[in-house]
Amino acid sequence: MAHVSAPQVPIDPVTGVVGVNPAKLTPAYWIDQEQHPDRILLDRAGIAAQNARMRAQDPAIHDLRALPAQLSRDAVQQDIQALSSTPRRTLYDLQGQVLDAKVLDALHDRLALDAVAATTPVRYGLVTHRADLRTFPTAQRVFSSTDDHDIDRFQESALFPGDAVAVLHESRDGQWLFVTSERYSAWIEKRYVGIGSAQQVFGYGAAGPQRVVTGANVTTTFTPEQPQVSQLQLDMGVRVPVLADWKPTDPVNGQMPYTAWVIQLPIRRDDGTLDLVPALLPRIADTAADYLPLTPRNFITQAFKFLGERYGWGHSYDARDCSGFTSEIYRAFGVLLPRNTSQQAVSPALDRIAFSESDPDARRSAAVKQLRLGDMVYIPGHVMVVLGHVGGLTYVIHDTAGGGWPGPDGARVAGHLNGVSVTPLEPMLASDTVSYIDRITNIQRIRPKSEE
């Protein structure tokens, strides 16, 4: 494969980033580039059809309702071992010590694979607090090197208040649960899951008015009366039921509710069972009565609400990574995407353009010129979302741990962006000699049914 040479683009003296002046860091700039910013890109029926395709065609999406009442020992053990296999790479702890065989054996023992019964009844629960999903049932952070503590190799993802899970197993110490959610299977702290009946779990928020979080995140009102729902973080796209018939004169956790929405949230009782309780969500919080219409204006506005947020591998730092960023933008519109870049990039439910190493440069370059707002561009381990074309360059917004581009002397400048950033695509370098465009593996598009 030949290489698409990265163009020499000036580094802006104010931002220090190639091709990006302060104006390009505002949503208004990109909205102004749109000829029809309020046109509907995909209507509610189209989104429902898209989600139905995703659930029917993509193996990364799990239908919890379709699980059998019981799972065999082999099925549970295989699910756990598919995730929690002994690491083959060298890993280090926070003190720079290598995770040796003794430590790895102890991690494996925590899985309690020998305790899996011949048949396991599937239990259901709701997540009660934003919670990490982990490779192993431990909060221990581990790293690929001794000098980079940002990327915890045991961090998989996160789940959010109200997310439904199927509970398949418990760790040796009884503090962790192995769960399957719609988009992921991993270990979660037991204290963040309330166990209920299937009817309770799948009935939560299924009918009645809702509030959808449209800010990067919002928090519920502080209350000492019910700490489990006090200042609870709700991230973009989380949808919670509203208790519309709550009497305005009845206090919620010691407070008159007229300045807030009275919402219902799951909590975990002391015995581990699920309860649903009222909480207050301030009316000034960035929320909406339904998923937002998918228009250029709304899409750009939602993406820019994360601008500058620190990169959080696997949803660490109470933030998100590149694929979490992408899926949470789309979640504000009710669009379902797989969790990881490797899954998103090849999803059969999306409008996929795939590339191989043998593809000519011209094919990649032509595809880049045809990119449009909201398209997702994948290189190994990373995804970028297209904003538009300006001055012969294609601009993207993405949550990136790094980034690089040619300096005035042609040598690669290592940009420590480490957060949600706006950059042009064409000058970005994956190495001293390879551009991002060289490394494009897939382009995915959310498509209306009429374009199938």
Image (cartoon, helix red, strand yellow):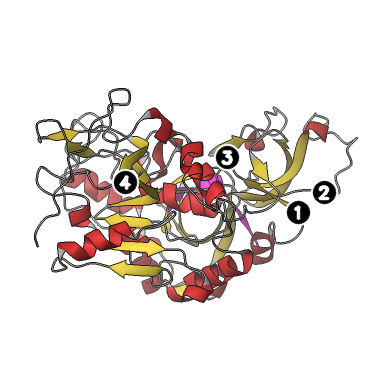
* Amino acid type at mark 4: Phe
* Image position of 159 (left or right of 251): left
Q: Which quadrant of the figure has residue 355?
A: bottom left
The residue tagged with tag 3: helix, strand or loop? loop
Do tag 4 and tag 1 residues touch (Cβ < 8 Å)? no
Which secondary structure lies at badge 2? loop
Mark 1 vs mark 3, CA separation in Å = 19 Å
Comes first in the chain, label 3 or label 4? 4
Q: Amino acid at mark 2?
A: Ala
Quadrant housing residue 124 = bottom right
Q: Residue at x 10, y 42 (%)?
A: 432
Mark nearest the camera among 4 and 2 is 2
Q: Which mark is residue 154?
A: 4
Q: Which mark is residue 349?
A: none
Q: CA distance from mark 4 to mark 2?
A: 41 Å
Decide which of 328, 46 is in the foreground and name it.
46
The numbered dot on residue 209 is: 1
Q: Is residue 6 magenta?
A: no
Count up the numbered dots: 4
Label 4 vs label 1: CA separation? 38 Å
Neighbour tally class for label 2: few under 14, some 14-19, many 20 plus, Cα within 10 Å: few
Task: Please tell me whether residue 75 is drawn above or below residue 26 in the rendered image.
Answer: below
Kindly state the secondary structure of the residue where label 4 is placed.
Answer: loop
The first of marks 2 and 1 along the sequence is 1
